[in-house]
């Protein structure tokens, strides 16, 4: 399963990042970076070689904690995530990752059981490859995932807030079905963020970063508490509507199907 490495390259010990192999003349950072999370050096070696020779910039870590630390930095286009890691189960790494990043993930595992494939895909992984695998096929799958991700994140026309809401940024006020809402500073910031992107699911971490000045001001359930008070104020105007929807395990979104007039 191993492939010969280009002369002069080395692989860092478990827990560290391996080197990126550059083609002659390639500019640093000009190629998509793929993070390999794999504790078997031979397999990691094969992946690095296959990716580097196909135009990618591979990085290697050998543990879940090292992967999460690296992924908190920007610049990774996709993650190849082994399920059987020495410290954290790959599924647990994925759950933690989704708390702060939507980077595409391809699961890699020696397990061939259908239940493992189902679990990985139901968690929201972009693809699932079992060992032994064809490096060429795996690279082709990666290219497919990145194409789909590029289409999904292509710039869209600015969202028009749904008719029930009117935001006055100058006065920092929001009206719901024509009625002004009495909002605290953070309630205003939360609702404005949701209204500007109807249907978009925001995680708690993203909302904290967007609305609160510093993370030190927040507690674990700060967002939940403010969403609760917002819901109460919206229901005072339209008691039968659920304007803010909870997406369990993901976050909150503004409903896209609100009627133009109160029920």
Image (tube, rainbow, N blue to C red):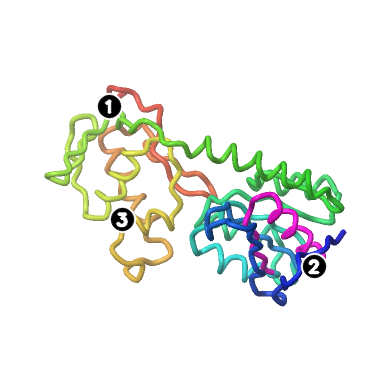
**For residue 52: magenta?**
yes
Distance between the Cα atoms at labels 3 and 2?
42 Å
Which is more toward the observer, 250 or 154? 154
Q: Residue furthest bottom?
A: 13
The residue beneath circle 1 is 163
Extent of the magenta region: 40-61
In this view, the mark in front (3 or 2): 2
Give the residue pinned by disc 2: 40
Quadrant assignment, res 50:
bottom right
What residue is disc 3 on? 211
Q: Give the percent coordinates (x, y) of residue 114.
A: 83, 45
Label 2 environment density (alpha carbons within 10 Å; few <14, some 14–19, many ≥20): few
Task: Judge whether 254 appears above or below 133 on screen.
Answer: above
**Residue 110, percent across and down?**
84, 56
First in sequence: mark 1 vs mark 3: 1
Residue at 72%, 77% in the rendered image:
13
Badge 3 or badge 2: first in the primary sequence:
2
Q: Is residue 19 above or below residue 53?
A: below
């Amino acid at each position: 399963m191993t492939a010969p490495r280009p002369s002069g390259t080395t692989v860092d010990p478990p827990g560290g990042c391996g080197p990126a192999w550059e083609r002659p003349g390639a500019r640093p950072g000009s190629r998509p970076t793929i993070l390999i999370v794999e504790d078997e050096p031979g397999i990691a070696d094969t992946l690095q070689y296959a990716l580097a020779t196909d135009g990618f910039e591979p990085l290697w870590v050998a543990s879940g904690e090292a992967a999460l630390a690296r992924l908190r930095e920007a610049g990774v286009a996709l993650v190849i995530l082994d399920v059987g890691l020495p410290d954290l189960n790959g599924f647990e790494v994925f759950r933690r990752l989704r708390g702060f990043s939507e980077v595409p993930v391809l699961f890699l595992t020696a397990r061939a059981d259908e239940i493992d494939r189902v679990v990985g895909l139901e968690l929201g992984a972009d693809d699932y490859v079992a060992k032994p695998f064809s490096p060429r096929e795996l690279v082709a799958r990666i290219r497919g995932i990145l194409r789909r991700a590029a289409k999904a994140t292509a710039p869209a026309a600015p969202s028009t807030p749904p008719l029930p809401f009117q935001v006055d940024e100058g006065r920092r006020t929001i009206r719901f079905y024509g009625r002004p809402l009495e909002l605290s500073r953070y309630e205003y910031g939360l609702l404005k963020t949701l209204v500007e992107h109807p249907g978009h699911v925001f995680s708690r971490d993203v909302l904290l970063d967007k609305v609160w000045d510093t993370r030190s001001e927040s507690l674990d359930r700060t967002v939940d508490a403010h969403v609760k008070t917002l819901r109460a104020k919206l229901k005072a105007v339209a008691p039968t509507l659920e304007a803010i929807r909870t997406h369990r395990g993901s976050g909150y979104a503004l409903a896209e199907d609100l009627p133009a007039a109160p029920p």
